[in-house]
Amino acid sequence: MTVLVLDGSKRASLAMVRSLGRNGVPVHVGECHHGSLSAFSKYATESVQYANPQDSREAFVDDIKQILSQHDYEMVLASREVTTLPLSYYKSELETETIIPYPGWEMMKLTVDKSETFKIAEEIGLPTPATYYLDSPDELNRLTDDLEYPLVVKPRSKTTWVGDKPKMMKVTSSNYVDNFEELQQITLEIYDAVGVMPLIQEYIPGDGYGVEALCDEGQIQSLFMHRRLREYPITGGASTYRESVCKPELEQPAVDLLASLEWNGVAMVEFRLDNRDGLPKLMEINGRFWGSLPLAIAAGIEFPYQLYQQYRGETVPSVNYEEGVTSRWLLPGDLLWFVSSLKNSSSKLNTVQQFGAFHNQNYDILSISDPLPVIGAIQNMLHQGIDVLKGNRNLSGEVI
């Protein structure tokens, strides 16, 4: 039977299409517009279109229900939070027609709301940044004598629905504050936007790592780790270049946290390895597929196909992955990193040398065996470029 993969313009969705297709699973691709990146893959046999969830969650869900009534899909996968969360929220309704291989909303919201995530982590004794939980802006004044800068002001959720439309708020350079005036300003901006106070956290200096897992009621079926080597924006954003690693000090905290949640399905637990004390400090959990998914697959862990096997009731074989494997999001992610780094770097030659190292690398999109998605990548770049010129997006690709 066929699997429907949503968010066809995203790299993670392309990785899902390729993983399932290579393993003999028929795949259709969905997106809110025609000509998505993944639709160009040789493994995608058909495309469907649905309402943009950024315009209306209800219209998106209604369209998915309509699509499911017209096609016999065994399973529906997604990669963006704005699509995964409605699938989780409406899981019981949608599963009358298909399998939704993500946790239901009661479990999912423990990762969506960072205050819930950090409270659980603190209860089980995981290292976390010092975190302040406030209910109203008035409470900021009582913290003035306790705070040490720099601090990070984090929205409790990346995606918050205001009525029928999602408000998406990521941590950017403006969320890092060095004094009370900056803290007050960004806190009030977030509160006014979504009506919920953000988290105020200690800044953790150190490299970023991801621990990815497939779980069955909290029991680890597969585990993978990676280290971020480059990201865009360079002040903190999506990874454009990363490497598979094995850090034993990261494994147990991730395993303990996922076990405490009794997590089902895939998840990525993000840490920073604190330069000051060497401890891995929790950053967040993503209860969905992650942008650097192509790296895990290149290193030997076929998470999409394994998730498919698990929800079909099949045995997921134990697989080891290769360390030192790299994967690169060249178009446009690493290209934007290069332009930004060249502008801000004190050693432009070093930046050029880093970017120019093409030997023995894997790519998120470029593939000799499945070359046509690069056409979709170029189309995406052109469309986003037009949106930037119109003022509808910033250079990071975020909708303004």
Image: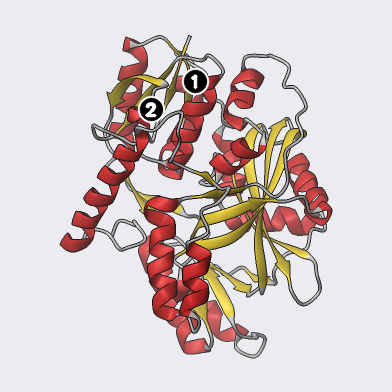
Is there a contact, CB below 8 Å, between mark 1 and mark 2?
Answer: yes
Q: Amino acid at mark 1?
A: Gly
Q: Is residue 50 visible?
A: yes
Residue 187 seen in this snapshot: no
Instruction: Characterize the local packing of mark 1: few (<14), some (14-19) or many (20 or more) Cα atoms within 10 angstroms.
Output: some
Residue drawn where x is 75% and y is 22% of the image:
317
Where in the figure is residue 27, as x and y percent of width and height?
A: 43, 19
Q: Nearer the viewer, residue 149 or 95?
A: 149
For disc 2, the marked residue is 41
Residue type at numbered disc 2: Ser
Dot 2: what SS? loop
Q: Nearer the viewer, residue 151 or 11?
A: 11
Is 152 situated above or below 28?
A: below
Disc 1/disc 2 C-alpha distance (Å): 10 Å
x then y, percent, for residue 101: 56, 26
**Callout 2 environment at 10 Å: few (<14), some (14 to 19), or many (20+)?**
many
The relative height of residue 27 versus residue 110 in the rendered view (above or below) is above
| Secondary structure of the residue carrying numbered label 1 | helix
Position of residue 275 measured from the top left corner of the image (x, y, whole percent): 74, 74
The answer to whether residue 6 is left or right of residue 237 is left
State which quadrant residue 312 falls in.
top right
Q: Residue at x 57, y 29 (%)?
A: 304
Is residue 181 shown above or below 381? below
Q: On the image, which quarter does residue 70 sit in?
A: top left
The numbered mark, 1 or 2, whose residue comes first in the sequence reads: 1
Which residue in the structure is indicated by mark 1? 21
Query: Residue 343 location, x and y as percent?
Result: 39, 78
Q: In the image, is 310 to the left or to the right of 57?
A: right
